[in-house]
Amino acid sequence: MATKQLASWALTLQFANLTTPVVDMAVKSLHNWGGCAIGGYHQPVVALVQDAMVPFAAPGNSSLLGIQGFYDAQHVALMNGLASHVDDYDDTHVDTPIHPSGPVASALLAFSEWKGNVTGKDFLTAFVAGLETEMKLGLSVYPEHYDIGWHITSTVGSVGAAVACGKLLNLTQEEMQFAISTASIQVIGMHSSFGTDQKPFHIGRAAQSGLFSAVMAKGGLHGALDGLEDKLGWVNVVSTRNNITDYFNILGKVWETTRNTFKPYPCDRVLHAPIDGWVQVRKQALEQGLSFSSITNITARTNPSVLFLTDNPDPQTGLAAKFSFYHAAAISLLIGQATPTQFSDEVVRNTTIKALSKKVSVIGDKTIPDYSAYVSVTFGNGIVLDTHVEHAIGSLANPLSDDYLRVKFLDQVSKQIGEENAQCAHMAFLNMVDLRDMRELTKTFTSKLTRRDSRRGDPSVYIM
């Protein structure tokens, strides 16, 4: 039974079982998630949800990372999960489109602050258990599950979060099976939400549902013991095909955690290779003194997934622009950057950006992997500049350096909580494995806040 097999493996996993590459990547994943979660609080949708939910949120000891409020763990899991994905700047599993850290870390940190006395090593072990659950489960139904419209990050995320929190709750094997099954029935997230306020909500809700499922199992809520593999269970309902047994048989032998990658640009991963190419073309054009106003044609040959996910020629918001091949081309050529600023509502409305985006076309080619692209730009004088990106920045073969990740983290976080607190947060996440209590992690960058900002237990206190 797959559900029983997963429960047994997760509960017996120890920190000593984790290889050095697994530990290193898990720490990087948490660090990157922390930067995205703190930095994501700048987006209006996060404030909107917080405003709407604060009357229903109970006082507590779990931290809203970007606005330093303290609430019950369920509310915090929702909010930090939402914030961590709102910029689409998070991590991505190489072999699926899963952004694994968001649901698991958001639930696990909120739970650990509530529980108290969770060491860094115990936290990291539970985190890896959750990540491996998500990615193995996702692999067992990919690509069919994704191609029919499910948002695979959130559909597997609730199960991963339940396993992680259930491990820290010391559930019995049967209780863990119940937790997994309860999480599996709370399926959330469809492609129709991509480019809208709803997409990051998927991740927050998955985190919240996973935490809820673990707590309910501990409290005695029963259900199916085979919720994943039953003929009417998760894998058979959400996908036309699965090989869950094969993937669960290699739990702890092949580590998906080491195949996690980090985004250099806050948009869908399939846009990264074309963006790299256009930035390179921009550099060539500047060196040759060419005018961008004379561009007559912009083309790219990419994997067909680019058209499947980002064929939006006229995005109306910054969130929608994260799924627009045309907007990505225009900002890369005209600005030479693709940071959260370039995916803001203001830049989307820029008439020069819009005008250039209308000159963009793309051709799908199944022989090209999604981490590669061929791009070409034609100028009015007939000059054509082109380039081939073999491995996009941030891909498995061309990963972000530690320095790149540091700069990315500090850039996001300092804008939200200040440079001094950002430096403290940066070091805290990198050194979290040595913590005796995970509550110390957030204290390192909230201790310098004013008394009003740092009060715990008052649901009316939060910074907007």
Image (cartoon, rainbow, N blue to C red):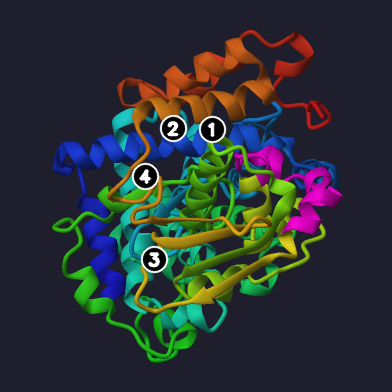
Residue named by callout 4: 127
Judged by its main secondary structure, the magenta piece is: helix
Q: Residue at x 61, y 37 (%)?
A: 289
The earlier-in-sequence mark between 4 and 3 is: 3
The earlier-in-sequence mark between 4 and 1 is: 1
* Corner quadrant of residue 286: top right
Q: Is 251 on the left-hand or right-hand side of 354?
A: left
Residue named by callout 1: 35
Distance of label 2 from label 1 (alpha carbons)? 6 Å
Question: Between tags 3 and 2, which lies in front?
Answer: 3
Distance of label 4 from label 2 (alpha carbons)? 13 Å
Q: Amino acid at mark 3?
A: Thr
Q: Amino acid at mark 4?
A: Phe
Residue 342 magenta-drawn?
A: yes
Residue 422 is situated, as x and y percent measured from the top left of the image, at 57, 18
Distance of label 4 from label 1 (alpha carbons)? 17 Å
Q: Residue at x 35, y 28 (%)?
A: 402
Is residue 1 depicted above or below 36 in this figure?
below
Q: Amino acid at mark 2?
A: His
Residue named by callout 3: 96
Q: Is 64 on the left-hand or right-hand side of 398?
A: right
Is residue 30 depicted above or below 417 in this figure?
below
Distance of label 1 from label 3 (alpha carbons)? 22 Å
Q: Which residues are magenta?
A: 334-356
Q: Residue at x 33, y 42 (%)?
A: 399
SS at mark 3 in the image: loop
